[in-house]
Amino acid sequence: MNYFESSKPELEKELSELVKLYKDYKAKGLSLNMARGKPSPEQLDLSMSILDTVKSDDKCLAEDGMDCRNYGEMEGIMECRQLFAELLETDIENVFVGGNSSLNMMFDTISCFMTSPLYEECEPWLNVTERKFLCPVPGYDRHFGITGYFGFKMIPIPMDSDGPDMDMIEKLVAEDDTIKGIWCVPKYSNPTGITYSDEVVRRFANLKPAAKDFRIMWDNAYAVHDVTDTPDRLLNILDECKKAGNEDLPIMFCSTSKITFSGAGVAALSASPLNMKILRNKYNFQTIGYDKINQLRHVRFFGNFDGLLAHMQKHKAVLAPKFKIVLEKLSENFDDNKIASWENPNGGYFVSVNVYKGTAKRVVHLCKKAGVVLTGAGATFPYGVDPDDSNIRIAPSFPSVDELSQAMDIFCLATRIAALEKMI
């Protein structure tokens, strides 16, 4: 039934029938959660043997003889740096291994540049009273939270099917030296699941910002997180920036949070020698070193980068059926009535759905009343404000297959009800 081609009495009849179904779901007293991209218990179980890689009688020696139980190696043990160098397709000398959270390293990076000027002729960002940051939307709410915390004015940048609107980005950064950076999730973007095209990456690499200290925060969180047999490929921005003479532009981040344990993984960053020098200086004062035993565990568990990729195939086996359920439910419910649109990602952790304009908050509310928790409407935009009130991020990873199927039935039902209410 195409809602846009139906009469008002037809829409009213459809709404009445859907409301009856909705009341039946509410009566079940369900408690289902699709709010955040948490690995499921089944996924976490895949990495349990990592705990057996270090024994009580183990001297915990790295390959170079470093005792991982003691102080030292602030930048991480060499074999762990090598693992991340291969993951990020960069050189080991430009890799810094941190704690369990790449988000923490992003926060630390912004914090560092707030007080440490990147060049002698530049002011620390704290002294730039009208400082701004570009935010592709829909995007990652925790990114926006960081720049919001540090007082940046956040400028939304629309996302296209191949990445953010580069015409808009190029114009803005060329004209305004108070714009200090941009957030990017370049592969399987959170939440749309799209991967930046080669052209978009090259245009990023060739930016000519008015602010010499402009930085691209390149959060490659889903670098190896494929869920189909036709994975996306991402052009290496570090290589492209070197070709363009802009090697200082990007700072790249990643972690094993959705590879091993989300609460006990390992994070890393990679950047140019200049950026690394400034960040190392901050870390010299901040820490004597991160958890090298955990770094050692991860290296022993994977063996090498090929071992990490083999491990990701196990995650794929768990996640692929869940993405299939979400996409099939969306297609079954909305191919005919045209009230919602969505991406079909080849990887990552989310499916981004645009419901009927002006109804996202209503959909989230209806779902909550029926026992399904979603990420709040507007969360994928700076300040939590989606001007169209339409984008909703679905996170399929945590619920079981049966729970996910029920949750999607309720989501689709709520989306149809909210659209009909608005139309009538």
Image (spheres, rainbow, N blue to C red):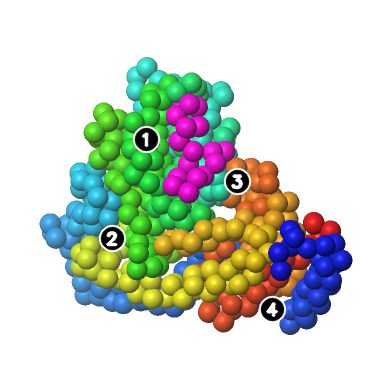
Cα–Cα gap, marks 4 and 3: 29 Å
The answer to whether residue 369 is left or right of residue 320 is right
Whether 231 is drawn above or below 43: the answer is above
**Secondary element at tag 3:** loop
The answer to whether residue 368 is left or right of residue 303 is right
Residue identifier under label 4: 30
* Of marks 3 and 2, the one in the foreground: 3
Q: Position of residue 11 (x, y in %)?
A: 81, 65
Residue identifier under label 2: 295
Crowd rating for badge 2 (residues with CA inside 10 Å; few <14, some 14–19, many 20+): many
**Which of the numbered marks, if any, corresponds to residue 381?**
3
Front residue of 236/109: it is: 236
Whether 187 is drawn above or below 229: the answer is above
Residue numbers of the magenta segment: 156-173
Q: Residue at x 60, y 42 (%)?
A: 382
**Secondary element at tag 2:** helix
Cα–Cα gap, marks 4 and 1: 47 Å
Cα–Cα gap, marks 3 and 1: 23 Å
The answer to whether residue 43 is left or right of residue 17 is left
Q: Residue at x 38, y 36 (%)?
A: 204
Whether 248 is drawn above or below 95: the answer is above
**Which of the numbered marks, if any, corresponds to residue 203?**
1
Cα–Cα gap, marks 3 and 2: 34 Å
Q: Quadrant of the C terminus?
A: bottom right
